[in-house]
Image (cartoon, rainbow, N blue to C red):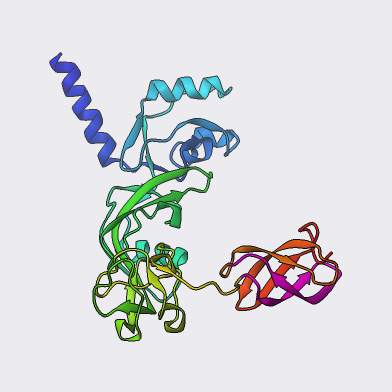
Amino acid sequence: MRRALAAAVCVAAWAWAEECALVEGDRIRAGDLARLRPLFSALDANLELAYAPAPGLRRVFSSAELGRLARRHGLIDASVEAVCVERVSERLSRERVIEAMRRSLGEGVRIEVVDWDRRLAPRGVLEFPLSGLAGRPSGPPAEVLWRGRIRTASGRTAPVWARVKVGVERRLLVARRDLAAGRPVEADDLEERLVEVFPRVALTPVTAEEAVGAVVRRRIRAGEVVTAEALKLAPEVKRGDRVEVAVEGAVARLRLEALAETSGRRGDAVLVRNPVTGRRFKATVEGPGRLAVRLEEKGAAQ
């Protein structure tokens, strides 16, 4: 038992003291071993021989293991000294993490990296996709988890993480005081301000002209951004309005006047009637008095 323990300690000391064959991917190839053990240069350099160790670890091939590996692939002179193999790895820097995040968020976004994955990681392309950005804070940007990955040359990925605070500045309407649900908004209730919001929050901003007179759907706190979702806005197209409909297709475009038979706001589908033919069809509201129809929508302008 003592002999075995002593032998293991010696092998470990040798493995860490000797130069190791460096492996880029998650497989050990003949070319990797050939750099330190020329016997393997007789094989195809891309021939996969074994799995590479995890980043930060080393794998030691004993002389007997290398001999069996060599003979398995037809090498006659299979006497070769032991060798260690280490995967090329590196620790992520804060600068590299921020650079990868900017590729997803673009410029003009404040990124504060609070903490990040400091484990040894394989070499590759660092990615932080927006799908990995957790949480949808509605208030000032808070600390959130962002899951990323390293894409290696072989196409495999290794997970990484970071805790960040991210925010983008936008000029938006905010409430100057608490606004109770059910009351109409007055001009003095609002002010335009440069605020920082979470990049993934889907805000539907409103103008002061749209907001004043609208009814508050839910309580809006002082300092909160006022959005279309929080207000019952007046429809941009009302039933009975005479509207202009743009009909567009790949080879034809035309405009006609129609009568709105339902009400809606931008993005809503409303029912309109062609006053000449009497036919009804649906069109999408694009703004006050303006609607659009794509030719694939059946019944358009008939």
Quarter of the image with the N terminus in it: top left
Query: Vertical placement of 35 versus 191: above or below?
Result: above
Q: Is residue 165 above or below residue 122?
A: below
Judged from this view, the residue extending furthest toward the top is 1
- The location of residue 29, given as percent across then percent down, is 51, 36
Question: Residue at 44% of width from left, 57% of height from top?
Answer: 130
Magenta stretch: give its range: 239-263
Most prominent secondary structure in the magenta stretch?
strand
Would residue 270 be found to the left or right of residue 217 on screen? Answer: right
Position of residue 116 relative to residue 278, above or below, is above
Considering every residue shown, the one lying at the far left of the view is: 2
Name the residue located 36 percent from the left edge and 38 percent from the top edge: 54
**What quarter of the picture does the C terminus occupy?**
bottom right
Q: Position of residue 51 (x, y in %)?
A: 45, 31
Q: Give 117 or 70, whichever is nearer the viewer.
A: 117
Q: Is residue 256 magenta?
A: yes
| Figure quadrant of residue 176 | bottom left
- Tell me the residue at 36%/73% (across/down): 226
Residue at the spot x=79%, y=56% of the render?
Answer: 298
